[in-house]
Amino acid sequence: MSVMDFVNLEFADEKMKRLQALLPAVRSSQANVLVSGPAGTGKSTLAKYILGPTDYIGLSAYDLVEDFDFSAFFAKSPVKVFMIENIDRLSTAQQKSLFEALDESSGLEKLRIISTSRGVLKNMAQKGQFREDLYYRLTVLNLELPALCQRVNDIETLAKHLVSVFAIIHKKSDLAISPEALEKMKMWTWPGNIRELENVLERAVILAENSIVQAAHVAIENNEESKDSTEEAVGFAGMTLSQVEQKLILQTLQMTEQNRTRAAEILGISIRTLRNKINEYRQAGLV
């Protein structure tokens, strides 16, 4: 669970300042909202803040069956507010079903959809990868979260907030962050964004001694590890596409300790597709 605070922190990044200024109006409205941004930027956390105390039902596109009937689901639901994560992963048939359900809703029974997307829906719609009519229904309000590498000036603010939160969680006295630790964090590109920063700093808080988080406690990927990753990627040369796919799927399953939902999210495929691939590999004696 993310411990990020999008509301009370004073950000230096201009894009985040503009987003913060919009939040009161967005939260008080009944309009559909799309929260987009790279993986790990806090889309779900922000979406849940927008929902506030409202009763809602959460869905993830990764968990929906191909012939999911949104109209029937919404009709049976006790609430009319929904959070749909990874909406950019909806299939063509699922997009059609959702558009028809939204088209049918009106008046007091009008649905409200708060959705998240890793992909840029506007670009996807322009390329024909996402229904343009559905895109406009979902993006009455559109909030975009930038990658952490694009807001380096916010890293100190974020780090101090996270350290204070994790210090409370792990029952540590007030912790400070050394200048060297902050500089180390600012030099990193953070491919996992805020999710990665949270992971690194929770570990740092646990390891910290003498009330100071030192650079040595900030365990981020180093150049040697990056080199190893590059060499491993080069190792795919000469393999067929299906062999590369198989290797990536099996490695991701191993990394996630066989958590299929998480593996499918990382791989950018549906849980159904992943299940079919696993069955295929099992029949071939590979798993």
Image (cartoon, rainbow, N blue to C red):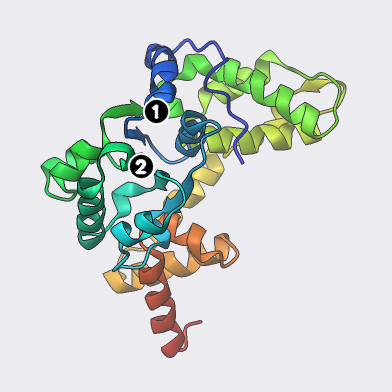
Q: Secondary structure at mark 2?
A: loop
Looking at the picture, does residue 10 appear above or below residue 253? above
* Quadrant position of residue 267: bottom left
Q: Residue at x 55, y 43 (%)?
A: 224
Q: Position of residue 100 (x, y in %)?
A: 20, 53
Q: Are marks 2 and 1 in contact (CB under 8 Å)?
A: no
Which residue, given by chain and number where applicable, does mark 2 sit on? Answer: 118
- Of residues 12 and 213, the one nearer the viewer is 12
Q: Residue at x 22, y 49 (%)?
A: 104
Q: Secondary structure at mark 1?
A: loop
| Image side of residue 161 versus residue 196, left or right | right
What label sits on residue 244 in the rendered view?
A: none
How busy is the neighbourhood of tag 2: few (under 14 within 10 Å), some, or many (20 plus)? many
Q: Position of residue 198 (x, y in %)?
A: 61, 34
Q: For the residue marked with disc 1, what is the amino acid?
A: Leu
Q: CA distance from mark 2 to mark 1?
A: 10 Å
* Quadrant position of residue 37: top left
Q: Position of residue 81 (x, y in %)?
A: 41, 42
Which residue, given by chain and number where applicable, does mark 1 sit on? Answer: 145
Q: Is residue 276 visible?
A: yes
**Dividing the image into 4 quarters, which one contains the N terminus?**
top right
- Of residues 61 and 73, the one nearer the viewer is 73
Q: Residue at x 58, y 32 (%)?
A: 197
- Of residues 216 and 93, the one nearer the viewer is 93
Q: For the residue marked with disc 2, what is the amino acid?
A: Arg
* Quadrant position of residue 106: top left
* Pointer 2 or 1: first along the chain: 2
| Image side of residue 116 versus residue 183, left or right | left
Q: Position of residue 268 (x, y in %)?
A: 36, 56
